[in-house]
Amino acid sequence: MKKIVAKLWRIIRGPMQWRVLWLWHSKFMVGVTGVVRDQDGRVLLLKHRLWPEGRQWGLPTGYANAKETFEDTIVREVQEETGLTVKVCELAHLKSGYKLRVEVAYEALYVSGRIKVASFEILEARWFSPDNLPEGVQGSHRQLISRQCF
């Protein structure tokens, strides 16, 4: 049986192999988070409208679109939610093991712009010192913020 499968696999080469693999394997959403810092070391936090009451403060976060790099996801999400331009730096965190998603986080640096919250999803956006965060920051986001890499 293994020999037959191997022979068929070699016959269908190229794009057809990718389609078979895509159908066979699990599908995941990729949640991407940005730990955006300014030149003074402050971190950008957003008050998310759709997050649970009392835990609404967190880092810029969104899901990657098809054919979008994770770095581009951070740039897009920050731009959409705050109007700011950022430069993505290093990978800060990668976590799998969830049923339907993978989480990725990157460090990012503020480049330019003024905060303009125009998103339905965001109530407020502000810069905070890492040692003076507001109540209601997600625990996992607190851990990302306390990570020292600069």
Image (cartoon, rainbow, N blue to C red):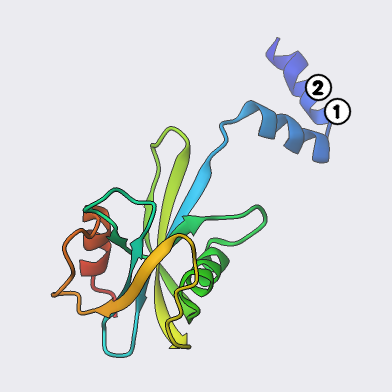
Residue sitting at 13 percent across and 75 percent down?
131
User: In the figure, residue 12 lies in which quadrant?
Assistant: top right
Q: In this view, does 45 lie above or below 27?
A: below
Identify the amino acid type marked 1: Ile
Identify the amino acid type marked 2: Leu
Q: Position of residue 73 (x, y in %)?
A: 54, 64
Q: Nearer the viewer, residue 119 or 74?
A: 119
User: In the figure, residue 42 lies in which quadrant?
Assistant: bottom left
Q: Relative to residue 109, is residue 131 drawn left or right? A: left
Quadrant the C terminus occupies: bottom left
> From where the camera sits, is residue 81 visible?
yes
Which residue bears the numbered disc 1? 11
Q: Position of residue 24 (x, y in %)?
A: 64, 26
Dot 2 falls on a residue whose secondary structure is: helix
Residue sitting at 41 percent across and 50 percent down?
103
Q: Where is residue 106 in the image (x, y as percent from the top left)?
A: 41, 66
Dot 1 falls on a residue whose secondary structure is: helix
Quadrant the N terminus occupies: top right
Q: Position of residue 55 (x, y in %)?
A: 24, 54
Q: Which of 6 and 140 is in front in this view?
A: 140
Proximity of marks 1 and 2: CB atoms separated by less than 8 Å:
yes
Residue sitting at 68 percent across and 34 percent down?
22
Residue 8 is labelled as 2
